[in-house]
Amino acid sequence: MGALAGAVIGNNVGSGDAGTGAAIGAALGGTAGAVKGCREDGGCGATTVNRRQYYDERAGRYYYYDTRTSRYFWEDGSPR
C-alpha cells in the first residue's frame, strides 16, 4: 500500500517520478509495518513489562509486573 500511495504522490508532486515515489512509499510503509509488528510482539524495547502472568486468587484476575517502574498492572493495563 505504501508503494502505491508513494507512486501516486510521486507522480503528482515534484518531478512527477512515480518510481521514486513508489520506492519511498515502500520504504516508509515497510518501516512502519516492522515497528508496529515488533511492538505488538512485545519487542523493540516497546515495553519492559514481564509478560508472565500472575494470578490473584482474591480478585480472580491476572496481572503483570513492570520491572522498569516496579509496579503491578492488571491484564487490561490498569494499575493494580
Image (spheres, grey):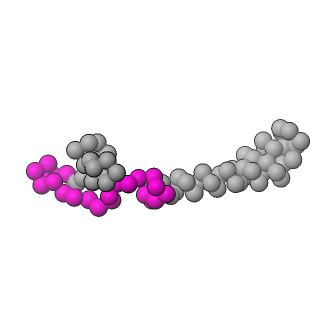
- Residue at the outermost right position: 15
Image location of residue 57, percent across then percent down? 12, 55
Which of 46/61 is in front? 46
Q: Residue at x 27, y 50 (%)?
A: 70
The quadrant holding residue 8 is: top right
Q: Is residue 16 above or below residue 60?
A: above
Q: Residue at x 29, y 61 (%)?
A: 52
- Residue at the outermost bottom position: 52
Image location of residue 30, percent across then percent down? 64, 56
Please report the bounds of the magenta region as a residue range: 41-61
Whether residue 60 appears in magenta in the rendering, the answer is: yes
Q: Residue at x 83, y 38 (%)?
A: 13
Q: Is residue 38 visible?
A: yes
Q: Is residue 76 left or right of residue 20?
A: left
Q: Is residue 2 left or right of residue 32?
A: right
Q: Is residue 46 left or right of residue 21?
A: left
